[in-house]
Amino acid sequence: MLDNLPRQYRKDPTVKTIADAICGVLMALETEAASVPPQISLDAVTWNLETEERLVGITPAPDATLESRRTALKSKWRSGGKLTIEQVQAVCDAWKNGEVVVSFTGGKIRLQFVGAYGVPVDLDALKAAVRLVIPAHLAAEYVIKYLLIRDIHEVMTISTLETQPLGNFAF
């Protein structure tokens, strides 16, 4: 900054002090400006999350994690317009565990978990996001994947079976 001034001003203590103060302000602005682009991404939003939630009418639970709040926001943004299975699938894909296949059978929206065994982590957040999208007269059926006898008998060794968490089994 000082290099842009005439030579006689470059060594003046007052000019140097003013230039240092201006540089400090400019650096602070540069740092703040660098934090703005990530706020546009629903996967990276942090300090702008509250504003985004307010814009779409979401009031997060007091104990909601940053990840579950981002998931709810993503789901809400994807939920506009006429309801289709693809739209519900997009909401489920926005969920952090995303391994859900959506179908419409027997007058119900069926959400089948095809990933890991057992009750998925943060299932309540997904249920809340789906409830925001589907009409009130439609039921949502959640099908959770568990280890069954056919998955174990003559398939797994005892040592492999012992490593499986109890939550993976249907009781």
Image (tube, grey):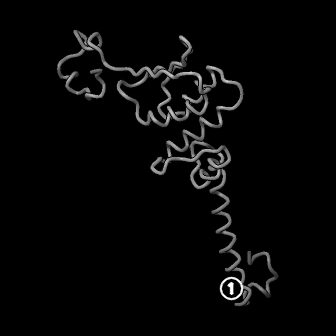
Q: Nearer the viewer, residue 57 or 115?
A: 57
Residue beneath the point at 59% across and 48% down: 45
Q: Nearer the viewer, residue 34 or 62?
A: 62
Q: Is residue 56 left or right of residue 99?
A: right
Residue beneath the point at 40% across and 30% down: 120
Quarter of the image holding residue 154?
top left
Q: Nearer the viewer, residue 170 or 96?
A: 170
Q: Amino acid at mark 1?
A: Thr
Q: Which residue is mark 1?
A: 17
Residue beneath the point at 25% across and 26% down: 164
- Give the answer, above or below, for where 23 lies relative to 169: below
- Give the answer, above or below, for where 158 lies relative to 106: below
Quarter of the image holding residue 79?
top right
Quadrant of the frame with the N terminus: bottom right
Quarter of the image holding residue 121?
top left
| Place of residue 40 in the rendered image (x, y in percent of width and height, measured from the top left) | 66, 47
Q: Is residue 133 left or right of residue 149?
A: right
- Give the answer, above or below, for where 76 lies relative to 6: above
